Amino acid sequence: MSITEHIITDKKGKPIAVQLPVSQYKKLLELAEEMEDIKAYDRAMKRKHKFIPFDQAVKRLIAKRKK
């Protein structure tokens, strides 16, 4: 993805903001969200998993809601 940005500076030439076309901004937001999803997946996969049958999981959830 090629980014066309416009850097806005203060009177001393210090960068203070970036201006992007809306389409590029939206694409960057999508990519950032995708990266967060990947990080969450990686964290989840590092944990030890104990798998149970679906029916048993549903029964546990129903039991917890009744409490």
Image (cartoon, helix red, strand yellow):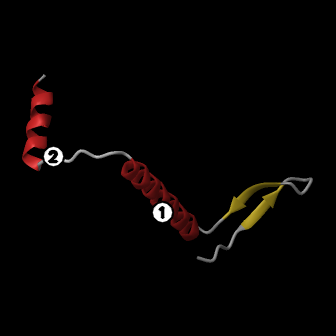
Q: Quadrant of the N terminus?
A: bottom right
The residue beneath circle 1 is 30
Q: Front-most of 44 and 27?
A: 44
At label 1, counting other C-alpha atoms closer than 10 Å, the crowd grade (few under 14, some 14-19, many 20 or more) is few
Q: Residue furthest top?
A: 67
Tell me where residue 9 sits by quadrant: bottom right
Q: Front-most of 65 and 45?
A: 45
- Kind of residue at badge 2: Ile
Q: Residue furthest right?
A: 12
Q: Residue at x 57, y 64 (%)?
A: 25
> Percent x, y for residue 18?
71, 60
Q: Quadrant of the C terminus?
A: top left
Mark-to-mark CA distance, 1 and 2: 34 Å
- Kind of residue at badge 1: Glu
Q: Residue at x 69, y 63 (%)?
A: 19
The answer to whether residue 19 is left or right of residue 50 is: right
- Of badges 1 and 2, the one in the foreground is 2
Tell me where residue 66 sits by quadrant: top left
Q: Residue at x 76, y 63 (%)?
A: 7
At label 2, counting other C-alpha atoms closer than 10 Å, the crowd grade (few under 14, some 14-19, many 20 or more) is few
Q: Residue at x 37, y 52 (%)?
A: 45
> Percent x, y for residue 36?
47, 54
> Percent x, y for residue 32?
52, 59
Whether the residues at callouts 1 and 2 have beta carbons within 8 Å, the answer is no
Q: Front-most of 46 and 19?
A: 46
Which disc is residue 52 wearing? 2
Q: First in sequence, mark 1 or 2: give its number.
A: 1
